Amino acid sequence: QQQVKQSPQSLIVQKGGISIINCAYENTAFDYFPWYQQFPGKGPALLIAIRPDVSEKKEGRFTISFNKSAKQFSLHIMDSQPGDSATYFCAASSQETSGSRLTFGEGTQLTVNP
Amino acid sequence: DADVTQTPRNRITKTGKRIMLECSQTKGHDRMYWYRQDPGLGLQLIYYSFDVKDINKGEISDGYSVSRQAQAKFSLSLESAIPNQTALYFCATSDFGAGGGRDTQYFGPGTRLTVL
């Protein structure tokens, strides 16, 4: 069973628009929520991460919004650029598994049209 | 990516063959992982190792085995490959997060495996 559900599976956005990817989790022990970005032919790489003690974290054009009560978190990409075209994975981990073991969502393929 | 290398990058094999995928890292990390990526399923953990003497099963370990030959080397074997093991395989490493922080996982470039 998928403990972290991600949507949409694919997303097409125009240059300059806002991209929004959503994730929901079930395990209330999860306490660390990273997002990974994967370009074609490459392995995923950490993009941004959040802990549940804050509701939002922003790094440049990338923002994570976190709703603990709803067990949901989302990635917002402002002013989306063609170079942002990639697959994005949300993930979660808990201290119960030493914090190293990540559970990934299904992935979202983002295409930003010029 | 150059810190984590995977060989081969592409492999085509036949049903029933034994195959080994190799991973090497120069990051000096103790923790290493093997994932499988399938379209629509994301990344699924096959095995992970927190040090040379520690091997743990992940979510989908059936049909796979691993060997941690050294801190820097972690190999994944398919004892008798079957077509539904056709996938993209990633090795990753991480270092224990200090000060309550969490590990960042660093992924290799992947191995595309096709089982006919």
Image (cartoon, rainbow, N blue to C red):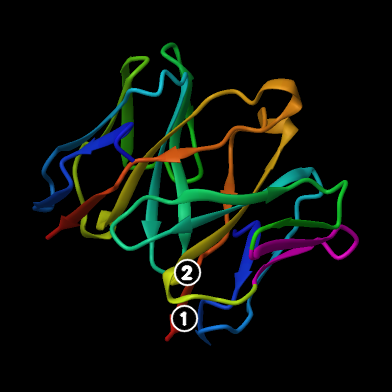
- Of the numbered discs in the image, which one, if any, rests on residue A84? 2
Residue type highlighted by circle 2: Asp
Give above or below for B104 relative to A62: above
For mark 1, does the 10 Å Cα neighbourhood hold few (<14), some (14 to 19), or many (20 or more) residues? many
Query: Given contact means CB atoms under 8 Å apart, are the residues at marks 2 and 1 in contact?
Result: yes
Of callouts 2 and 1, which one flags the residue occurring earlier in the amino acid sequence? 2
- Work out whether B75 lies above or below A6: above
Relative image position of residue A39 (x, y in whole percent): 38, 61
Give the magenta range: A61-77
Name the subunit of mark 2.
A
For disc 1, the chain is A
Q: Which x, y percent locates residue A1?
A: 59, 59
Task: Please report the residue visible at 33 percent of the width from the left and 28 percent of the height from the top.
Answer: B66
- Which residue is at the front of the view, A23 or B27? B27
Residue at x-position 32% and y-position 33%: B4
Judge left or right: residue A61 versus residue A65: left
Q: Position of residue A77 (x, y in %)?
A: 62, 70
Q: Is the magenta stretch mostly helix, strand or loop?
A: strand
| Gap in angstroms between the C-alphas marked 2 and 1 | 7 Å
Residue placed furthest toward the right: A69
Name the residue type under label 1.
Answer: Val
Q: What element carries label 1?
A: strand
Residue A112 numbered mark, or none: 1
